[in-house]
Amino acid sequence: MNAKITVPAEVAEALGLYVGATKSKTEAFMSIRNDGDIYKQSSVIRSYFKSNIDGILEALVNGYTVEQTPEEKVREYWSKLMSDRYNVNDEHHLDKLSAEIHGIIKTLNLLGIKIEGVND
C-alpha cells in the first residue's frame, strides 16, 4: 500500500473540488490535466506539482493529508512544551523549558505575530 502524500491546504481544497465535481478520481485527474491553467483550482494543483503529473495521480489514488500551517506547527510545539513543563521533576530541565517558552513568546511578539493559544 502506498502512503498518503502531504499537500498544503490550498492544494487539498482544489483537489477536493475536482473530486467532488466529477464522477470518479480518474475523471478528476483528466479534468485537472486537460484544464491546464484555465481555472484557479487546476492552476493551484499544477503549480504545486509542477511537471510531476504522477504526483497528482498519487494524491488522488492514495489520498493526501493536509500540511499544517506554520501557526499550527508553533501551537503544537507550544502545547508539547507546556505539557512537558507541568510533568517535569528536574529543576534544570524545567529552567530549559521555561526559557524556550519565553523565547517563543518574545520572538512572536518581536515579529508582531499573534497565535491563538500561544501569545494572544
Image (spheres, rainbow, N blue to C red):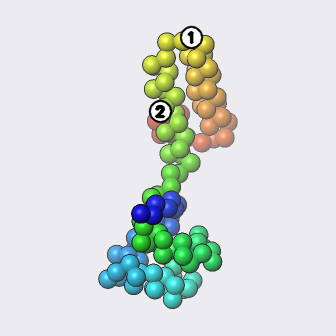
- Quarter that holds the N terminus: bottom left
Task: Give the Cα separation between the discs numbered 1 and 2.
Answer: 20 Å
Q: Is residue 89 above or below residue 116?
A: above
The label number, if any, that marks residue 24 in the structure image:
none
Q: Quadrant of residue 37?
A: bottom right
Q: In front: 7, or 62?
A: 62
In the rendered image, residue 15, in percent from the top left (x then y), is placed at 44, 72
The mark lying in front, picked from 1 and 2, is: 1
Specify the amino acid type for callout 2.
Answer: Ser
Q: Which residue is mark 2?
A: 79
User: Tag 2, which secondary structure?
Assistant: helix
User: Tag 1, which secondary structure?
Assistant: helix
In the rendered image, residue 119, in percent from the top left (x then y), is placed at 53, 33
Q: Which residue is mark 1?
A: 91
Give the residue at the far bottom of this rendering.
34
The residue positioned 53% from the left and 51% from the top of the image is 69
The residue positioned 53% from the left and 44% from the top of the image is 73
Q: In front: 51, or 117?
A: 51
Specify the amino acid type for callout 1.
Answer: Glu
Give the residue at the far front of this rendering.
1
Q: Is residue 50 above or below residue 98?
A: below
The residue positioned 58% from the left and 17% from the top of the image is 93
